[in-house]
Image (cartoon, rainbow, N blue to C red):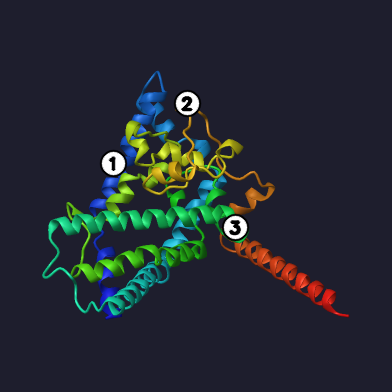
Amino acid sequence: MFYDFLEKISDKLASVNLVVPGLIFFMALGSALIAYWRTVEHKSFRDFFDFAFPTEVILHPSARADALFWITKKLMMPFLLIPAGVTFVAAVGYGTNKLIGGLFGIQSPLIDGPAGPVVIVIFTVTMLIAYDISYYLYHVAQHRFPFLWELHKVHHSAEVMVGITKDRVHPLDELMNRMWDGVIPGICFGIWSLIALDPVEVTIFGVNVYIVRNILMMDFVRHTHFKISFGRLNSIILCPHWHQVHHSTNPRHYDKNFGLLFSFWDRIFGTQFIPDPNEELKFGLLDRDVRDYQSLFGLYILPLKKMSGHIVRRFRKRTSKAVQTQDSLLP
């Protein structure tokens, strides 16, 4: 049965088609046009090209590091990260199904036959919320715990943002995130497997809802310099400009706007910051060693060294305390 869970979730992730890159491209182009039209007074095609692809951004060492990191990470994804994410969600879902099913004597789904439209919509909404709150909680933890922050610094070390900066995430960080994602979404999926037979998320024009989510939240655009706001929708959906604030080096913006798709988590937990539409943002880290992260060594190896340093120091501190306590108990 576990392999059935694995196959179901794998099928959900396999629905990516050629529509997606096209949508991302046109959304990025449209965002660039909107941002350009709002900020530049005298307009021309040359000015638009310079605005969309500024030389100081494209040729920045951080942008070159993004490109190298993106290429090398994409080579790893099919062999490590995607299978791991599927496995964790399937394992927790299977365990939840067996545990709750055993406790309440549920041997088969409560709803006979295939899930209807209402069930599919409710299932989709609950899974989206489960993934979103899961991401929010892990993202907060990345900023709270030093050993997680050392990995997450890879993402925040980008001094310019060029779209593919969205994938500037250390593989171990992404693996741990997917492990954590197996908990809340996995439990949610396991419960739903007891309610309906083979529940599937809504597809929009044949595109998986999670891909649509990524398009709606404009993950590519939010990792550029285009200040795009959704107006009144900002109270529900986190717009690119608000996420760009999260990358700002301004102390006022520290630990703000952690959300993935929905912005209301930040409002609920007091981590929301609403920027001025014309506020200039500087990206990166205030650490002196920020330039050390603009190479493959700095993006892959340096975080592991620093993370292990935190763990070793914490172990030594605990060991020292234990020895002192033992000594104080001696006669």
Q: Is residue 135 visible?
A: yes
Q: Which residue is mark 3?
A: 145
As drawn, which residue projects farthest toward the right?
331
In depth, the one of 127 and 211 nearer the eye is 127
Percent position (x, y) of residue 104?
27, 76
Label 3 environment density (alpha carbons within 10 Å; few <14, some 14–19, many ≥20): few
Percent position (x, y) of residue 210?
29, 55
In depth, the one of 8 and 105 nearer the eye is 105
> Earlier along the polypeptide chain: callout 1 or callout 3?
1
Q: Which residue is mark 1?
A: 26
> Earlier along the polypeptide chain: callout 3 or callout 2?
3
Residue at image point 19% right, 72% down: 109
Q: Amino acid at mark 2?
A: Asn
Q: Which residue is mark 2?
A: 278
Q: Nearer the viewer, mark 3 or mark 2?
A: 3
Classify the position of the C terminus by image quarter. bottom right
**Label 2 residue SS:** loop
**Label 1 residue SS:** helix
Q: Is 118 displayed left or right of 302 in the figure?
A: left
Q: Amino acid at mark 1?
A: Phe
**C-alpha distance separating marks 3 and 2:** 32 Å
